Amino acid sequence: MAVRDQSNMAWLLLTFTLPTKRASQRVEVWRKLQRYGTVPLGNSGYLLPRNPMNEERFQWLATSIRKYGGDASIVHVQGIDNISTPQLIGRFTEARGREYQKLIRQLREFSERPQPKRALGRLSRLRSRFQEIVEVDFFPSPLQKRVAELLTNADAARLTTGTSERQKIDPREYKKRVWVTRPRPGVDRCASAWLIRRFIDSKARFAFAPENQVPGKSVPFDMFHEDGFGHRGEDCTFETLQKDFRIRDRRVKVISEIIHDADIADEKFGRKEGYGVDEILKGWARQGISDQELLDRGMQLIEGLYHAQS
């Protein structure tokens, strides 16, 4: 979530202590702080720009720390007397810059070496890591665009060398199957499930699993799994399914553009409807509803979008 207004910056500072015997919990907290994009403020604690998402993350983390027998406080900070706002922002951009530079090196290595059969999975993991960094790139780094270009180039090279060539799909092989995706489905996965249920198999069942625990006979979708259906080139998972199963419904084509713009956020088709769907799903997810209910509600939203195109 990029921070646009820097003229009146407010910050969140998390301070905490944990008992020395809680080594594993200390590592867990540190990893979450890394994932949230925090920067340390000397020995005082960890800093984030103040926004609803960051405040919620700190609140959950503080609750966990207290459960582990520690103390945690979240302080709202308007300014720091010996560090200016530009200097604070510089610390965040430097941290994201280091992460982007590491990705750039990995993508260059990926492009320079002959790609094995599992190249698609590796490229998907790099893309996933890029999205994680973008989410906490609060003051967008110029390197963000460079990494996006390298990912696009890697996709194009993979397609031209034939590493992602797929045989034609026989839809009959995908009847009465269990389709598996990651927990907490978002706009692309909900829309993909709707497409599967409406056009591929009306009796399709859906399940959720971590990346390394996909059941053998299931069909993975929107996962970093070489045997499933996921992002391909510039396409989101919905577009991949639409093309592989040759779904030519006019209204589905419109929805594919809506989902692409909401999921990829590149404004390729200039369609804004999907952003609302995405925000609704995020809101429901924060209410703590189950993965299955979240998926069902998302599918209902896409069904409404489908009929809205009539």
Image: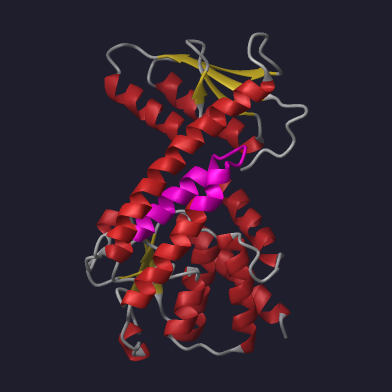
Instruction: State whether residue 43 appears in this view.
Output: yes
Work out whether residue 54 or residue 91 is closer to the camera in this orientation and state it: 91
Against 1, residue 168 (above or below) is below
Instruction: State whether residue 59 appears in this view.
Output: no
> How far from the left and from the top, in percent, is residue 241?
45, 78
Looking at the image, residue 208 sits to the left or right of residue 81; the answer is left
Quadrant the C terminus occupies: bottom right
Residue that protrudes farthest toward the right in the picture: 7
The residues colored magenta run 123-146
Residue drawn at point x = 39 percent, y = 15 percent? 69
Quadrant the N terminus occupies: top right
Against 199, residue 91 (above or below) is above
Residue 171 image-quadrant placement: bottom left
Q: How many marks?
A: 0
Work out whether residue 243 or residue 70 is closer to the camera in this orientation and state it: 243
Residue 232 falls within the magenta-colored stretch:
no
Work out whether residue 88 or residue 301 is closer to the camera in this orientation and state it: 88
> How far from the left and from the top, in percent, is residue 129?
42, 48
